[in-house]
Amino acid sequence: MHANGTSRPVTGRPASPAVLRERDPMTCQVRDILSRIGDKWSMAVINELGCGVQRFTEIKRAVPGISQRMLTVTLRALERDGLVSRRVYPVVPPRVDYELTPLGRTLRDQVWGLIDWVVEHHDDIDGARRRYDTHQE
């Protein structure tokens, strides 16, 4: 039991790995949010919007392989979660800008940390994959 009287950690303290093994509503929320922000398109869009306000077409050009539909779905989900804001300008043709919210910027910092980790360790991971694949053949 934690200081807040629940099985969840006190806000501000890192969650232990056990939080994902608990069977309570918070665990479901944590898994849901992790699946949303952890998918490859959300991470790529958050990374791109970390550079500042952008239009839909700019984001699409900057994120290789993302379809228009998937970008739309991803932006809507991130907007729903409060991570991205969407501003529509009443001009012809319509202009729509996207940017990270203050909450989204806190996530951007974490995403950038994860990207830095991948860049630092991609050779190690490639080597491990080759060794694994060699043993599987």
Image: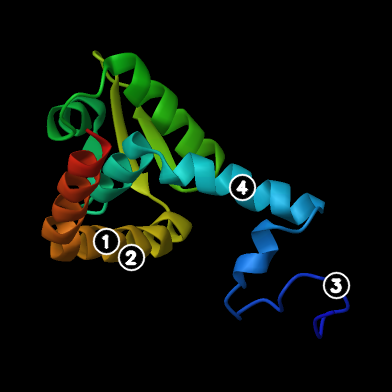
- Tell me the CA gap for discs 4 and 3: 18 Å
The residue that mark 1 highlights is 112
- Tell me the CA gap for discs 1 and 3: 32 Å
Between 87 and 51, the residue placed more toward the observer is 51
Which of labels 2 and 3 is toward the front? Answer: 3
SS of the residue under disc 2: helix
- Tell me the CA gap for discs 2 and 3: 29 Å
Label 4 crowd (10 A; few <14 / some 14-19 / many >=20): few
> Which image quarter is the N terminus in?
bottom right
Q: Tell me which label, 2 or 4, sits earlier in the chain.
A: 4
SS of the residue under disc 1: helix
Q: Find the residue positioned furthest to the right.
A: 5
- Tell me the CA gap for discs 4 and 1: 21 Å
Question: Which amino acid, by three-letter code, is at mark 4?
Answer: Arg
Task: Identify the disc placed on residue 31.
Answer: 4
The residue that mark 3 highlights is 6
Label 1 crowd (10 A; few <14 / some 14-19 / many >=20): some
Give x and y (percent) for residue 34: 52, 48
Label pair 1/2, CB-CB below 8 angstroms? yes
Between 113 and 125, the residue placed more toward the observer is 125
Give x and y (percent) for residue 26: 74, 55
The residue that mark 2 highlights is 109
> What kind of colouring is applied to the model shown?
rainbow
Give x and y (percent) for residue 13: 61, 81
Above or below, 49 against 75 in this view is below
Label 2 crowd (10 A; few <14 / some 14-19 / many >=20): some
